[in-house]
Amino acid sequence: MIPPPVPSLIPGTRLVHVARQPIFDAAGDVVAYELLFRGRMDAVDAERRDAYATSQVILNAFAEFGVDEVVGDRTCFINVTREFLVGELTLPFGPEGVVLEVLETIEVDDEVVAGVTALAEAGYEIALDDFELGTAHERLLPLASYVKLDLLKSGAELDEVVHRCRAYPGIVLVAEGLETGEQLALTNRHGIELRQGYVLSRPQVLTATALTPSRMRSLQLMGELSTTDGDLDKVLEIVAGDPALTLRLLRATNSAAVGIPGRVSSVRQAVVLVGLSQVRRWAMLMAVEEAADVNGVQLAEALTKARLCENIAPSFRVSPDAAFMAGLIAAVAGLLGTTPAALARQLPLSLEIDSALSRGAGPLGQVLRVVNAYEHGDLTEAATAYRGDDLVGSVMAAMRWSTLTLGAAL
């Protein structure tokens, strides 16, 4: 099969990847996906690579694609490192629909047992990856919901391993690394409930275009959230000043595993719904991630559009916060090479914003039409539709604001 062409990137954007490998039940139905890292680690120190890979998978799945886009209503298995198990890095999502895989390479000591115990008590389901008898990982069997067995390694010991795991009625067995029909028959013979491997399905790599976040903005956000009494208004200023941070927050808000109900109509509402504590967790992951350089011109144009929508909103009796959000999403859609309607479908937007972006409906749709007309040089249409006195003045004010905002961040 000829691979699809790599899309040309707009400055200020990058390609992000995540792989998913199906996990099947005995009837052949997909019941879950394991999410896997796909990317380069050339510039990552060896001791940071595992944490980096986990952080990238979480950020990409939850904040770039939206986890619902990746796994739908199925469970997702995510490999986690020691840092996440013992609390050095905090998981930015709740336990719903997520299984945490403890890798066989993790040294299980008292600190790890205590951390896994706390996660299990908080409702997270635990899977033991590539489990073998005679290792310290046996200490985690009472806490596990799933045990994954590599049939390539188990061999003659498989009977004993299965028997040992069956002593814990709550454990579901997963046969992984299945490559042949013989191994699949062995899985059936032992009554192993779930199956995963190349003989059933290879991992599928998903790729999307994402905005590159400002390194300085991410550091500013991390600094503001470093204390327990972070200033909400300052956090809002930082997030709203970087389209990439805003989009990540919205996608994270829309993820079922975050546990946030409802739809949002402003950056403030998204931050309040998620909570500063949850935003802090995402900021910690972004600090782990390597951030590439941003293109200031592209971001300035996106912020100018959002701010212009906000500035003229009162003339259409529209909430300035909702107008800013709609303008920002419309601008980001252009940077990502998609349509505002397509991007809106991925986000937990209020009906007013969704209708404006998808169909140009309502007063907010009129705001977007005015701004779009001005951007395309149709000054007559823009001036005719605008009910205010000084459209050019509003444009200049928006440009000054975006320049100052980016100047403070870059």
Image: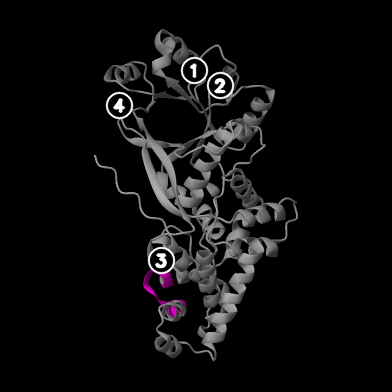
Q: CA distance from mark 2 to mark 1?
A: 8 Å
Front: mark 3 or 2:
3
- Looking at the image, which residue sits at the far left? 1
- What residue lies at 55% left-to-right and 63% top-to-bottom? 296
Question: Badges 1 and 4: C-beta atoms under 8 Å apart?
Answer: no
Give the position of the N terminus as an image quadrant: top left
The residue under label 1 is 165
SS for dot 2? helix
Q: Earlier in the sequence, mark 2 or mark 1?
A: 2
Question: Badges 2 and 1: C-beta atoms under 8 Å apart?
Answer: yes
Q: Earlier in the sequence, mark 4 or mark 3?
A: 4
Q: CA distance from mark 3 to mark 2?
A: 48 Å
Q: Earlier in the sequence, mark 3 or mark 2?
A: 2
The residue under label 2 is 141
SS for dot 4? loop
Q: Mark on residue 199?
A: 4
